[in-house]
């Protein structure tokens, strides 16, 4: 008898025991979240993965997250992603060559030493460049702390790839407009503002999922529910963040709603699968999406793809077949990318 996909996943996972672990990002579809060993945002998953000893990490998220698990992983561990085409269009807005070109241009004109700070939503190659120059990775929960760390030391910061997270961080740190320089995503890498006296240089990448939320979405929910709490992700546009009551990482959005009283009303501006799930999980609160904005790359990880991954691990252990799909960061990027990630953990945990 052919078992259903979910039963087969549970059966193989059970058979493999501690040898395999399945982390899932908050934006995964509900069926995947239900099968995961732990769920979190990029920062939480990076930390959890670095603490596990399982031989196989089947990462249910997008490519850069699986790369982070590989960079921070132990030598005996193998990291798999169920769908190899699950990328991040935001991370793809800047590659290693471009980040180096922009850095060179800014560094040659700015009167301060420039430190790269890269959002975790970036390729291993970009993280590696950042580590090589003494910079740090950041996440949406610690972007302000990491940026401030370097500014306090008298450095300037080149922040990439998400413009909204950069500008919302600048507002939080009360950096004046004349100190902020926007680096355009065109072939000439044009900039706005004065590079010489600039302290925060921001690449203009964006996440299409969070760019979708508008002022009208916020105003419409506020009009219908005067007592509503609006909570949004800092990858949203600045005016949306300004009109919201709270702006925070996905993990903090989850924590905030979890501790909210029964009967409270929430409008949430982040990926729809996450909002849909917490609506069910916290059914005694009234939770609504600002609009249904879906990350199609996250949604590529289906139970069938996860089953393929698990079957490949099982076959690999029995016959040494091929793993589907292993993520291996080139050794040339690993060491410096790890430096940039560990720098973030050190600044945050200090
Ligand atoms: S939600 Fe946005 S930043 Fe996150 S993986 Fe999807 S495209 Fe990338």
Image: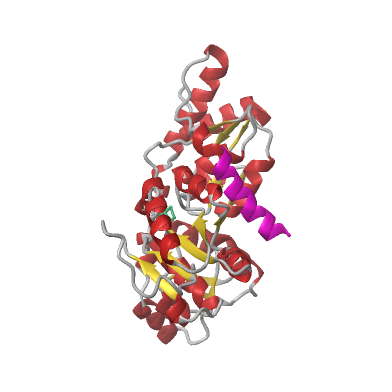
Observer-nearest residue: 140 or 269? 140
Instruction: Say whether residue 20 is magenta.
Output: no
Instruction: Say whether residue 342 is magenta.
Output: yes
Q: In which quarter of the image is the C terminus?
A: bottom right
- Corner quadrant of residue 224: bottom left
The reply, left or right, for residue 281 in relation to residue 51 is left
- Corner quadrant of residue 153: bottom right
Colour convention = secondary structure
- Magenta stretch, residue numbers: 335-350
- Which residue occupies the extreme left position in the image? 187
Observer-nearest residue: 22 or 172? 172
Observer-nearest residue: 18 or 193? 193
Q: Is residue 95 visible?
A: yes
- Image x and y of residue 142, in percent: 59, 63
Ligand number 1: quarter of image: bottom left
Looking at the image, residue 20 lies above or below residue 126: above
- Image x and y of residue 195, in percent: 41, 70
- Image x and y of residue 34, in percent: 55, 46
- Which residue occupies the extreme top position in the image? 319
Report the number of discs.
0
Looking at the image, residue 79 lies above or below residue 214: above
**Residue plotted at (66% across, 69% down):** 259
Magenta highlight: main SS: helix
Looking at the image, residue 68 lies above or below residue 2: below
**Residue plotted at (53% across, 18% down):** 316
Q: Is residue 290 visible?
A: no
Looking at the image, residue 33 lies above or below residue 109: above
- Image x and y of residue 1, in percent: 47, 21
């Amino acid at each position: 008898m052919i078992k259903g996909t979910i039963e087969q996943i549970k059966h193989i996972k059970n058979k493999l025991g501690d040898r395999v672990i399945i982390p899932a990002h908050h934006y995964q579809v509900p069926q995947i979240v239900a099968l995961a060993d732990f769920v979190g945002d990029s920062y939480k998953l990076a930390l959890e993965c670095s603490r596990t000893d399982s031989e196989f990490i089947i990462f249910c998220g997008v490519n850069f997250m699986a790369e982070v698990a590989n960079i921070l992983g132990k030598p005996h561990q193998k990291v798999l992603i169920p769908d190899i085409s699950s990328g991040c269009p935001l991370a793809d807005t800047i590659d290693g060559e471009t980040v180096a070109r922009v850095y060179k241009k800014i560094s040659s004109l700015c009167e301060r030493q420039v430190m790269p700070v890269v959002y975790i939503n970036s390729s291993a190659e970009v993280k590696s460049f950042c580590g090589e120059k003494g910079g740090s990775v950041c996440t949406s929960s610690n972007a302000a702390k990491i940026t401030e760390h370097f500014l306090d030391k008298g450095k300037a910061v080149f922040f990439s790839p998400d413009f909204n997270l950069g500008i919302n961080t600048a507002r939080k740190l009360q950096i004046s407009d004349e100190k902020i320089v926007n680096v355009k995503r065109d072939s000439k890498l044009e900039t706005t503002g004065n590079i010489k006296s600039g302290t925060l240089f921001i690449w203009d990448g964006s996440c299409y999922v969070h760019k979708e939320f508008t002022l009208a979405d916020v105003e419409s929910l506020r009009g219908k529910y005067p007592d509503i709490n609006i909570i949004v992700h800092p990858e949203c546009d600045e005016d949306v963040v300004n009109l919201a009551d709270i702006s925070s990482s996905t993990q903090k959005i989850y924590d905030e709603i979890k501790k909210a009283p029964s009967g409270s009303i929430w409008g949430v501006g982040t990926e729809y699968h996450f909002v849909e799930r917490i609506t069910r999980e916290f059914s005694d609160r009234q939770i609504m999406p600002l609009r249904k904005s879906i990350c199609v790359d996250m949604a590529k990880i289906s139970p069938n793809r996860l089953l393929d991954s698990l079957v490949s691990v099982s076959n690999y252990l029995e016959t040494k077949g091929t793993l589907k799909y292993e993520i291996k960061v080139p050794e040339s990027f690993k060491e410096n990318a790890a430096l940039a990630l560990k720098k973030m953990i050190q600044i945050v945990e200090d």
